[in-house]
Image (cartoon, rainbow, N blue to C red):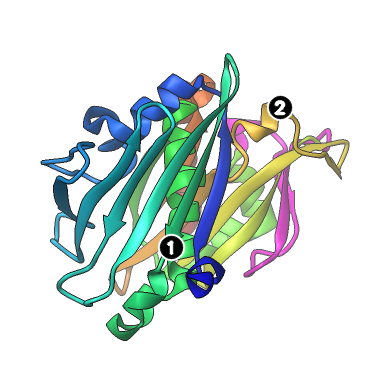
Amino acid sequence: MENLKNTAVKTTMEFDVPARDLWDAITNPSHFKKWYFHIPHFTTTVGESFDFYESEARKYLHHCTVLELEKGRKFVHSWEHPEQSEGSSIVTWLVEPIDDHHSRLTLIHEGVESFSEAGPDFTPENYQKGWDSIIKTSLRNYLHLIEKLHFSININATKEKVWKTLWDMESYKIWTAPFGEGSSYKGDIALNSRVHFLTPEGNGVYSDVIFFKEHSLVVFRHVGNVRNCEELEIDNESRHWTGCFEVYRLVEINENTTELEVEVDVTDAHIEFMKKKFPLSLEKVKELSEK
């Protein structure tokens, strides 16, 4: 049992919603299908089971049996991968009220080492990354009304040319002008780099590059605000959105055509602004790349 505790995966997150809303989000299928998985026959009845796949491609069957329920506070179920492993683990969801408008979720996944024979996709490190992403990004975005917007455009140019247009400073200032004249960035577009996205006054956000493949993919995780070119500590305002992603992906259609795909997490207050401005910016990228 001690070994089980040592290998347990754990993630904790505070949310700007009451505990009852957090509980509904993790136990009501009409809510969690929007941020978690689609589970057709979900149940919270102790002793009953439910199954689901990780995606519509029916990858990785999950079999779960409800072990314990304290309504509004605690939900415990087994977690198995019967098509890949004979192992078994336990997932515990704990909901705590902080005050009338804030709550905390702690998720503990014990026994993941029992799936070791299933291959590299089933390591404790992968479970930690997966749960962190699910709880700290997907669930947080859902509860905080942060929407993932998708944009794309076909450009008659190579991936290398489009990439240069995106991140060369002079062209960057041109294609980002619809968001604000004089926009710029400081830092390297490279894995594990810290980048400041700035207005001419030196205000903006600072972000980390968490995935990077030159000419193909860059993923920014936004961290906090910048004022007068200085990084600010995470406060109540930035805590609401810290960890949001912005993704730029280049897909080669043929040797002279590239599809530029953008995904961006946007707070409720900025959704309409982004829907209006991003298409204008992508048209600028297309125009500059095709010259």
**Dot 1: element:** strand
Q: Nearer the viewer, mark 1 or mark 2?
A: 1
Residue 282 horizontal side relative to residue 57, left or right: right
Q: Residue at x 48, y 30 (%)?
A: 274
Q: Is residue 162 visible?
A: no
Q: Position of residue 223 (x, y in %)?
A: 67, 45
Q: Position of residue 29 (x, y in %)?
A: 23, 33
Q: Position of residue 222 (x, y in %)?
A: 62, 46
Q: Is residue 202 visible?
A: yes
Q: CA distance from mark 1 to mark 2?
A: 32 Å
Q: What residue sits right under mark 2 in the picture?
A: 236
Q: Which mark is residue 110?
A: 1
**Dot 2: element:** helix
Residue at the far front in the pictured view:
1
Q: Quadrant of residue 119?
A: bottom left
Residues packed near mark 2 inside 10 Å, few (<14), some (14 to 19) or many (20 plus): few
Q: Residue at x 51, y 75 (%)?
A: 3
Compared to 49, does 234 lie above or below? above
Residues packed near mark 1 inside 10 Å, few (<14), some (14 to 19) or many (20 plus): many
Magenta-tinted stretch: 177-202
Residue 174 horizontal side relative to residue 231, left or right: left
Q: Position of residue 278 (x, y in %)?
A: 46, 36
Residue 199 horizontal side relative to residue 51, left or right: right
- In the image, residue 245 lies in the stretch drawn in magenta: no
